[in-house]
Image: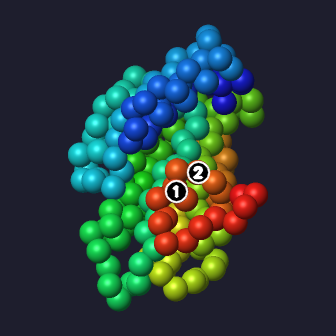
Amino acid sequence: AAKLGFNVAILGQNEERLTKTATAINEINSQILIKTIVADLSGDAVKVTEQIVHQLEGLDISILYFNAGYGVMELASSPSEATLRQFRSNIVTHQYLFQELYPKLAARKTDASRRGGVLFTASVGAFIYPPVMAVYGATKVYLGHLGECLATEADSFGIDVVSLYPGGTATRFSDRITNVSMPKGI
């Protein structure tokens, strides 16, 4: 997006990582606005949505990328507070943010050269149902299906919608899963 001249707003829980990411984006294109927002999507969905929307106020939004994820590997029969945080992060707060931001994207004036976009990061976990991942997989089914269902409606507003289903990747997300190790090379 930065290479194409889009302003970029990124959000995450770790301010230091956001600053490093903003610096890297600035090296790609120093002419764009880069906004960082520290937020925890696993908390109170209404409050965090209000916080994020307030910080995005006045910005022309062209692309929404719902990429935050929270994974917990535990039996559905023995859920913990972490399972609820996962549900809030992967579904509830995503939905609140979507409801606040999508209408602004749909209201933009578009033409063939100025379309908008929405991306949802689901997971291959939406199709694979191993033990201890039932709730995680279900949250990713929701995100992926929301994007797929939205695609036809969104096209009439000049918005392209894509649901992404990545497999295992070596990220901080996978670092938090303590009882499973990632295969080498991922």
Q: Nearer the viewer, residue 75 or 2?
A: 75
In the displayed structure, does residue 97 sit left or right of residue 146?
A: left
Q: Which mark is residue 175?
A: 1
Up the image or down, 175 lies above or below 138; here it is above
Q: Nearer the viewer, residue 121 or 82?
A: 82
Q: Secondary structure at mark 1?
A: helix
Q: Quadrant of residue 146?
A: bottom right
Residue 156 pos. (x, y %): 63, 49
**Residue 169 seen:** yes
Q: Residue at position x 28%, y 37% from top?
A: 51
Up the image or down, 43 lies above or below 39; here it is below
Up the image or down, 157 lies above or below 113; here it is below
Q: Dot 2: within a 10 Å radius of its alpha carbon, few (fewer than 14), some, or many (20 or more) residues? A: few
Placement of the C terminus among the 4 image quadrants: bottom right
Residue 122 pos. (x, y %): 58, 62
Q: Nearer the viewer, residue 78 or 92?
A: 78
Q: Which mark is residue 171?
A: 2
Residue 172 pos. (x, y %): 52, 50
Q: Quadrant of residue 157?
A: top right
Q: Residue at position x 62%, y 42% from top?
A: 117
Q: Which mark is residue 49?
A: none
In the displayed structure, does residue 71 sit left or right of residue 82?
A: right
Q: CA distance from mark 2 to mark 1?
A: 7 Å
User: What amino acid does circle 2 point to?
Assistant: Thr
User: What amino acid does circle 1 point to?
Assistant: Asp
Q: Secondary structure at mark 2?
A: loop
**Residue 145 seen:** no
Q: Quadrant of residue 3?
A: top right
